Image (tube, helix red, strand yellow):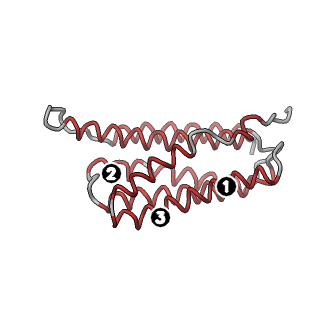
């Protein structure tokens, strides 16, 4: 499979996921009494939108520098898209029941799974990445493992306090806000 075809497919699926996510969030009637609730729905949607956007940005930045697409990468990409397509479900649960630990646990579980699949996909892609040294690739892998650990920790922390998990959910997009400078500054090989 050509890299461009996989990129186009992934871009289309991500666009559909974001569209479905916004359609699934049912805002309560906006009144002066529940304005804070409405704003929390929008904030939770924005957080999930940012998570999906940053994941898509890092995916595209990573794949920009991959020379060959293997069957393993394709299957991991499908698994990645599947888990990414689940993000609207815990987003909706978090909107409806923000103050329950179960909704935070559900959100943390899905984001942990997403981080695991993304990391596996990157490991599969590592031998095909051009213009990066082994130490630069190791830095990328370290960041991915950190996200797996923090999202996984958010699940049991939700039991102690939903605010611990909320801090992790907000911290992770900040950590991933920009893709690795090494990937941005690397020069892709001429086609």
What residue is disc 3 on? 153
Q: Which residue is pictured at 71% across the width and 52% down the height?
A: 139
Q: Earlier in the sequence, mark 3 or mark 1?
A: 1
- Where is residue 58? Give x, y as percent: 63, 42
- Real-space Cα distance between discs 1 and 2? 28 Å
Foreground: disc 3 or disc 2: 3
Identify the secondary structure beneath mark 1. helix
Identify the secondary structure beneath mark 3. helix
What residue is disc 2 on? 94
For the residue carrying disc 2, how many other residues have a C-alpha within 10 Å: few (<14), some (14-19), or many (20+)? many
For the residue carrying disc 3, how many other residues have a C-alpha within 10 Å: few (<14), some (14-19), or many (20+)? some
Q: Earlier in the sequence, mark 1 or mark 2?
A: 2
Q: Is residue 18 above or below residue 111?
A: above
Q: Is residue 21 left or right of residue 180?
A: left
Identify the secondary structure beneath mark 2. helix
What residue is disc 1 on? 121
């Amino acid at each position: 499979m050509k890299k461009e075809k996989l990129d186009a497919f992934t871009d289309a699926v991500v666009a559909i996921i974001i569209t479905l996510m916004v359609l699934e969030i049912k805002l309560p009637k906006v009144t002066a009494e529940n304005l804070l609730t409405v704003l929390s729905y929008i904030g939770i949607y924005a957080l999930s939108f940012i998570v999906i956007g940053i994941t898509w940005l890092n995916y595209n930045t990573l794949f920009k520098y991959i020379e060959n697409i293997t069957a393993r990468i394709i299957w991991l990409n499908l698994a990645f898209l599947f888990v990414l397509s689940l993000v609207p479900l815990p987003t909706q649960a978090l909107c409806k029941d923000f103050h329950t630990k179960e909704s935070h646990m559900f959100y943390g579980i899905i984001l942990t799974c997403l981080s695991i699949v993304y990391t596996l996909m990157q490991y599969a892609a590592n031998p095909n990445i051009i213009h990066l040294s082994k130490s630069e690739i190791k830095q990328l892998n370290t960041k991915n493992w950190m996200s797996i650990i923090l999202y996984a920790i958010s699940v049991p922390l939700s039991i102690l306090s939903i605010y611990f998990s909320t801090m992790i959910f907000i911290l992770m997009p900040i950590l991933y806000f920009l893709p690795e400078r090494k990937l941005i500054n690397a020069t892709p090989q001429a086609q």
